[in-house]
Amino acid sequence: MEDKKSVAFVLIDCEIESVHNIIDELKNLDTIKNYEKLEGHWKIIVKLEAESLDKIRDTIRWKIRKIPHINTTLTLVEYM
């Protein structure tokens, strides 16, 4: 049986000119499984997977939110 991983999606608001630099930073995080650029208020959505919600929470709080030029984030957690 496969271990169930915790999954969350994070919407990121930032200045449009910072999107590529932010994505470059996100690519270095091991919990990031996918990302897409968006149009509208939210400029990026990322999918995170980890062994626990604590690891996801730590990644968001101490890594993603510390990336320069991110204005705000909104996290959506998948519950199964």
Image (cartoon, rainbow, N blue to C red):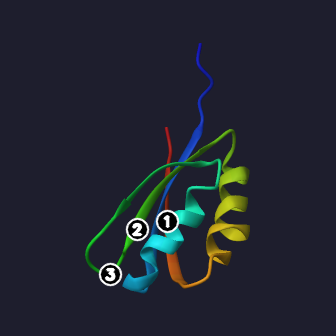
Residue 44: which numbered mark, if any? 2
What secondary structure is marked by label 3?
loop
Picture layout, residue 3 above or below residue 43? above
Callout in the foreground (3, 2): 2
Q: Amino acid at mark 3?
A: His
Dot 2 or dot 1: first in sequence order is 1
Crowding around mark 1 (Cα neighbors within 10 Å: few <14, some 14 to 19, many 20+) is: some
Q: Provide residue 41's location: percent of width, then percent of height.
A: 32, 81
Picture layout, residue 36 above or below residue 17? above
**Cα distance in 3D space between marks 3 and 2:** 9 Å
Q: Residue at x 69, y 43 (%)?
A: 52
What secondary structure is marked by label 1?
helix
What secondary structure is marked by label 2?
strand
- Judge from the rendering whether residue 7 lies leftward or rightward of residue 44; answer left or right: right
Residue 23: which numbered mark, if any? 1
Callout in the foreground (3, 1): 1
Q: Provide residue 39's location: percent of width, then percent of height.
A: 26, 74
Q: Amino acid at mark 1?
A: Ile
Q: Residue at x 40, y 68 (%)?
A: 44
**Cα distance in 3D space between marks 2 and 1:** 8 Å
Dot 3 or dot 1: first in sequence order is 1
Crowding around mark 2 (Cα neighbors within 10 Å: few <14, some 14 to 19, many 20+) is: many
Image quarter of the N terminus? top right
Quadrant of the rendered image containing residue 25? bottom right
Please give the residue where the numbered disc 3 appears in the rendered image.
Answer: 41
